Image: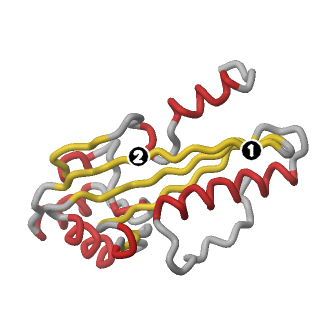
Amino acid sequence: MAPEVDEELVHGELPQDRALRLARAKASTVARLRPGAIVIGSDQVASIGEGDAAQILRKPGDRDTCRQQLLAMSGRTARFDTGVAVARDATLISHLEPTLVHFRTLQVCEIDSYMDREPSFDCAGGFKCEGLGVTLFEAIETRDPTALIGLPLIWLCAAFRDTGVKV
């Protein structure tokens, strides 16, 4: 179920705070509409840079924006903060799973070739790590590789076990 949650940027909000805020809002909104249901909300925010200087990378939507984002990540480390929340009635638990993606130095022709083979304009950052996007990286650092795809399943399974939901 798609929650009706305002996803506008909040001035001064750090990327990791945004991811967690939106995951909680999504889960809480749907939980209010579905009493008794176990609801999962998730949101991912991609960024480069640190603290107040962090630049948020959105789903590019088109080829030119995707090229610009991939060039911005070239030779740098991008951070993907994946927030996840589980709600049931008034109970809400949440978690933030950071993932660092170390990009190799990319040439424009490599980026164009990648976009030709696997257009990922609807993905945060403009690539799919579960596909050919791995050709763009030097390394990925994470405790949960499923977080980069958008839902940290290791934490989610543990949260279910902790709350008595059989997985």
**Identity, as a three-letter code, of the amino acid under mark 1:** Leu
17 over 155 or under it: above or below: below
Q: Quadrant of residue 92?
A: top right
Measured from the top left, where is residue 141 in percent x and y? 29, 41
Left/right of residue 167 with respect to residue 60 in the rendered view:
right
**Identity, as a three-letter code, of the amino acid under mark 2:** Leu
Q: Quadrant of residue 147?
A: top left
Foreground of the two, 90 or 166: 90
Seen as rendered, the residue at the extreme right is: 35
Q: Point out which mark residue 92 bears.
A: 1
Q: Quadrant of residue 142?
A: top left
> Between disc 2 and disc 1, whose residue precedes?
1
Measured from the top left, where is residue 136 in percent x and y? 19, 53
2 vs 1, front mark: 1
- Give the position of the C terminus as an image quadrant: top right
The structure residue drawn at horizontal position 25% and vertical position 56%, both measured from the top left corner, is: 117
Residue occupied by mark 2: 148
